[in-house]
Amino acid sequence: MSSQTTTSVSERALLLLEAIAKAEEPPTLNELMAAIRLPKATTHRFVALLERLGFVRRTLDGRRYEAGHRLLSLSLDGMRHSFDLAPRRVILSSLVKEIGETCNLTTLDGDHLIYLDRVESAWPLQYRLNIGSHVPLHCTASGKLFLSLSPAALRKAIFRTQPFQRYTERTLTSTKLLEAELTRIRQTGIGTDNEEFMEGMAASAVPVHDSRGRICATIAVHGPITRLPLSRALALVPALKRAAKALEQTLLPDTSASAASPSSSTAAAPSPATTRGSVRAPK
C-alpha cells in the first residue's frame, strides 16, 4: 500500500470517527455515508473495520453507530487534558475558598460519571470521593444534569442497560419518576441530589459548556446536610455558575496571536469539541 493510499484511508477513518462524535444522535449508515461523502460499500467497510477495532459500536437496535470503548477512552483522555490543570485548579480552589464547601469537576465516562478534579474544604466532616472515582448517573446532581441534557435516544439506551440501583430511601428507581425529575432539571439547568446517592449528603451542579454550547462537564458542590442542606446548595448556584464560566474560557482556543497578526482580519473560530462527554444543551 502506497503512502498516499495509507493517508487517504487514515483521513477517511478519522472523518468517520469525527462524524460519529459530532452527531447529536447516533447516526445510521446512510447518514454517515452522506456526512463523509463516500459510497455506501466503502462507508460500510470503514465502519466494520472501526467496529472490529473497538472505536465504533452499534446501538442496541443494531441500526445506528456510536462511539466504542476505545474512542470513549480517547475522548476521556482528551477531556482530562483539555482543561489546563493550573487554571482549573485555581478556579476550583477560589470557588471552594469563596463558598467554604468541597467542589468537584465531572464528566461522562460511558454510562457513569468520573471525577476529573476535586478541591476539598477545610471542614473535618465531609464526604470524600477521589479524582478518578466513578459514580452513577441516576442519583447524583451532576449525573442527572448530564442525563437531562442528553438526546432522548441515549437516555433511553442508558435506562435499558443500567438498572436503577437504590442507594438510599430517596433514590429514584422508577423510570417515570426519574424522567419527571430530569424534565425539571432540564428546565432549571441545575442538577440536585437530596440524599439520593448517600444518606446525609446534598449537592447541586451546573453545566460547563464547550465552544459549541454543549455540556461537556459539570461543577458541583456537596456536603453533609447538617451543614449544607439542599436549600443552601441551591443558594450557592450563582457562585458555581461564575466558576463554570471561568472554566469555559479555558476551553477556548488562544486567538491572541492571530488577532494581533496584520494578515489576520478576524480571530480564528473555535474548533468544535469532539468529546463523547459533550451533549447539546437546550436553547
Image (cartoon, rainbow, N blue to C red):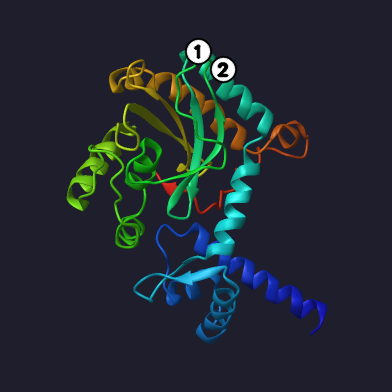
Q: Amino acid at mark 2?
A: Ser
Q: Return the mark for residue 98.
A: 1
Q: Amino acid at mark 1?
A: Glu
Residue 157 position, x and y percent, is 34, 62
Question: Which secondary structure, mark 2?
Answer: helix
Quarter assignment of residue 283: top left
Can you see residue 65?
A: yes
Quarter assignment of residue 135: top left
Q: Return the mark for residue 56.
A: none
Mark 2 lies on residue: 94
Query: At x 53% / y 41%, what residue is drawn?
Result: 211
- Name the quadrant of the N terminus: bottom right
117 lies above or below 240: below
Question: Which secondary structure, mark 1?
Answer: helix
Contact (CB < 8 A) between labels 2 and 1? yes
In this view of the protein, which residue sits in the foreground, 28 or 49? 49
Q: Residues within 10 Å of mark 1 (few under 14, many from 20)?
A: few
